[in-house]
Image: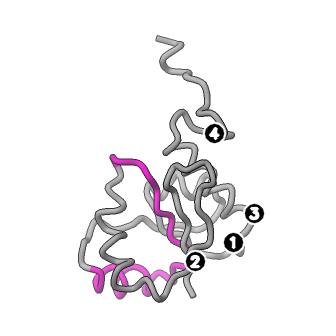
Amino acid sequence: VIRAERRPTAPGYALGRSREEGGFYAACRWLQTNAPANAVVMGRPAYLLHLYSGHPTTQIEPNTRARVQEIAYVTKRHVGYLVQDAWPWSHSNDYLLPYLREYGDKWALAWQDPQGSGVRVWRRL
């Protein structure tokens, strides 16, 4: 049981037992060292994002309507960065992909995991 609970870190990552988890923590580290200290970051789960990035955070709301995401959540909360995680359980892409299709011109890809987990960080233009 202990061996299963304390699995080794995924190869190539400082933290995380899977590539998806490692990519999330690598994105947090990137934000910690590259984003302005007061920049609001949106992602899932927001509490881990805050804990590991040190930034004020808000969660990606479970809403597939891009206009609602933009007006009610992103603009209202002054989101400067989006974290597009690769965890299947978070369902972030269910909400981010429709949003980025419609509002992608307001964002630039700031970072993507060089280890290939699929995790990305987007910066508001």
Question: Residue 89: x, y in percent?
Answer: 33, 46
Question: Residue 51: x, y in percent?
Answer: 60, 53
- Mark pair 4, 1: CA separation: 20 Å
Q: Which residue is mark 2?
A: 123
Asked if the residue at tag 2 contacts the one at tag 1, i.e. Cβ–Cβ closer than 8 Å, the answer is yes
Asked if the residue at tag 2 contacts the one at tag 4, i.e. Cβ–Cβ closer than 8 Å, the answer is no
Q: Nearer the viewer, mark 1 or mark 2?
A: 2
Given residues 92 and 72, the one toward you in this image is 92
Where are the magenta residues, as a range?
66-89
Question: Residue 92: x, y in percent?
Answer: 36, 60
Helix, strand, or loop for circle 2?
A: strand
- Mark pair 1, 2: CA separation: 9 Å
Q: Earlier in the sequence, mark 3 or mark 4?
A: 4
Q: Earlier in the sequence, mark 4 or mark 1?
A: 4
Q: Which residue is mark 1?
A: 35
- Please tell me which residue is depicted at 33% across the width and 79% down the height of the picture: 69
Identified by mark 4, the residue type is Leu
Q: Which residue is mark 4?
A: 15
